[in-house]
Image (cartoon, grey):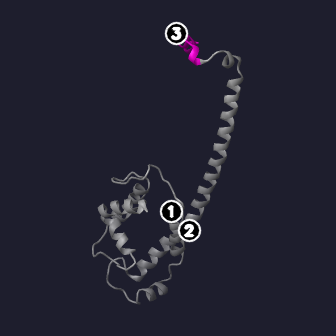
Amino acid sequence: MAWKRQFNAVANRTPIIRKLIMVTSVEPQFTDGEAHTVEDVGRVGKDLMNVLSGKAEGVARAPGLLITNEDVRSIRRYVNTGLSLPTKLEEVSQLVGGSDNGIAGLAPDAIAELHVGIQTHARSWSAIETNMQKVGSDLYVFSGNLITIASHVVDFIKGLESYQTLQVGDLTPAQIDRKRST
């Protein structure tokens, strides 16, 4: 829930995100009445990544892209919804009432093209999710190996005669300096 507050704080300062939230709110609002440049729309992904990674101003999330179980569930909902969107012009025309409403970017053919893009994007999630799971598994194995190797190194050092007979705390500063120079 904290990330939603943080996201909303940034979204309220970022007009294009606020406008997209309006478009996807429960009560449909198809436009805010303003034209948006490609740069405005392209900035949305960057702004979202900055929010998620804690780099955006006013976001308290730890740096780095941390994906929670809730994030994965949200992405899966997006994928399922995206894949269920109609992409055929006839289906989209029926969805929007069969006529061009005269609003730029909201004609049936533009919406069908948008749905195709959303579906392409949604299909990319499966490979990302699989790779994330593989990296997680690899990190788990690596951490186990690191602990095992570190334990062996510590045991080896403890087995050295000098470790048994000489403690670092027993050395004088001059002896430590001599050991560093050798």
Callouts 1 and 2 close, C-beta under 8 Å? no
Magenta span main SS? helix
Q: Position of residue 109 (x, y in %)?
A: 42, 80
- Residue 29 figure quarter: bottom left
Determine whether, in the image, residue 130 is placed left or right of residue 8. right
| Circle 3: element type | helix
Label 3 and label 1: CA atoms lie apart by 56 Å
- For label 2, the residue is 123
Please tell me how crowded label 1 is: few (under 14), some (14-19), or many (20+) other residues with Cα within 10 Å. Answer: few
Q: Which residues are magenta?
A: 168-182
- For label 3, the residue is 174
- For label 1, the residue is 71
Q: Position of residue 139 (x, y in %)?
A: 62, 47
- Mark toward the start of the polypeptide (1 vs 2): 1
- Mark toward the start of the polypeptide (2 vs 3): 2
Give the mark toward the camera: 1 or 2.
Answer: 1
- Quick one: quadrant of the C terminus? top right
Residue type pointed to by label 1: Asp
Label 2 and label 3: CA atoms lie apart by 66 Å
- 56 over 161 or under it: above or below: below
Residue type pointed to by label 2: Arg
Q: Residue at x 33, y 67 (%)?
A: 18
Q: Position of residue 69 (x, y in %)?
A: 54, 61
Q: Residue at x 68, y 30 (%)?
A: 153
Determine whether, in the image, residue 2 is placed left or right of residue 160. left
Whether residue 60 appears in magenta in the rendering, the answer is: no
